[in-house]
Image (spheres, rainbow, N blue to C red):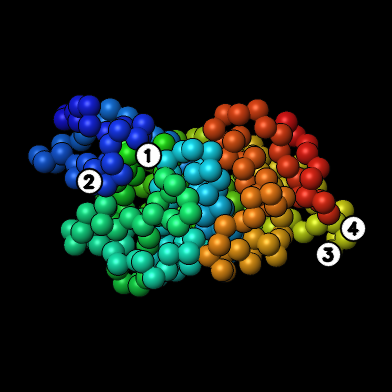
Amino acid sequence: MIEYKGVVSCDGKNSSRELFRIASAGPADGKEAVWPFMGTVILVTSGKGGVGKSTLSALLGQAFSTLGKRTLIVELDAGLRCLDLFLGFGEDVVFNLADVFSGTCGAADAMIRVPSFEGLYVLPAPARADKPIPAERLAQACRSLSSAFDLVLVDAPAGVGPLVRAAASAADRALIVTGADPLSSRDAYVTKELLTEAGCTDCRLVINRVAPVGRTRKKLPDLDQIIDRAKVRLIGVLPESEQIRSSLLQGKPLPPESPEQQIFSAIAARLLGRNIPLIISEKSLQRRIYK
């Protein structure tokens, strides 16, 4: 076992580039490292695709950054990269996660700092699906990278394949994203069971794209029913929102005072252990329940 002594910190005393260099280098003899600081690794996953994992990863990363947390988002979905567009740095990507694993570059070279957000970085997925990310090395990479950040968000592909299982084995917590429909919530339960088998037992549920009252439904969906199907503790409910869609497609942050930003800030604060009530999306997006 090799210990990195007095080198990595998240208190601003070391430059970001030095932190990245240390985190990506690893021990020279191939033995497992003992890191002096370990941030929290949060896996963002789902049973089915298209439910909003990358939306949650992008906007939650911004919320953590606003709360003063040094945050890295690791994007795993090779061939379906989108965080570069969602977070407004599409023209800046030179290297990606597959390049790091292949030895083409170090993690420091592949990471992009998100514009307008101090301390928020992304390690993008490859744009082509034929550039694989090795599952057998992913868990150690996540642990290594967490030595340089308060939080590492792992934006996973859909399902629970080898990459997701590997990330789950290194994750401190998983956020399972589901829609409000019965199929999505059933898939969330299956995902939770598989994550538990992989070693990630601390799971929380995020219900996405809940349409406001008066638009496509007369009342909100029965959240208790969704939670009962998924059998996962609820931590957040996201609205079906044109503001979210527009901000992501333009690569711009949510307006600071918008109801949508309040929702993501509340989820981030709850994940940090703060006693913040859950904000439920209704017509005004302001009703608060489930403390």
Using a 10 Å C-alpha cutoff, classify the residue at mark 3 as few (fewer than 14 neighbours), some (14 to 19) or many (20 or more): few
Cα–Cα gap, marks 4 and 1: 44 Å
From the viewer's side, name the closer residue of 153 and 198: 153
Using a 10 Å C-alpha cutoff, classify the residue at mark 4 as few (fewer than 14 neighbours), some (14 to 19) or many (20 or more): few
Q: Is residue 290 visible?
A: yes
Cα–Cα gap, marks 3 and 2: 50 Å
In this rendering, the label closer to the viewer, 1 or 3 = 1
Q: Amino acid at mark 4?
A: Lys
Q: Is residue 272 above or below residue 121?
A: above
Give the numbered dot on residue 235: none
Secondary structure of the residue carrying numbered label 1: loop
Cα–Cα gap, marks 1 and 3: 41 Å
Q: Amino acid at mark 1?
A: Phe
In primary-sequence order, the first of circles 2 and 4 is: 2
Residue topped by disc 4: 218
For residue 261, side relative to residue 56 (left or right): right
Q: Residue at x 71, y 60 (%)?
A: 240
Cα–Cα gap, marks 3 and 4: 7 Å
Secondary structure of the residue carrying numbered label 4: loop
Secondary structure of the residue carrying numbered label 3: loop
Residue topped by disc 3: 216
Residue topped by disc 1: 149
Cα–Cα gap, marks 1 and 2: 13 Å
- Which of the 4 image quarters holds residue 168? top left
In primary-sequence order, the first of circles 4 and 1 is: 1
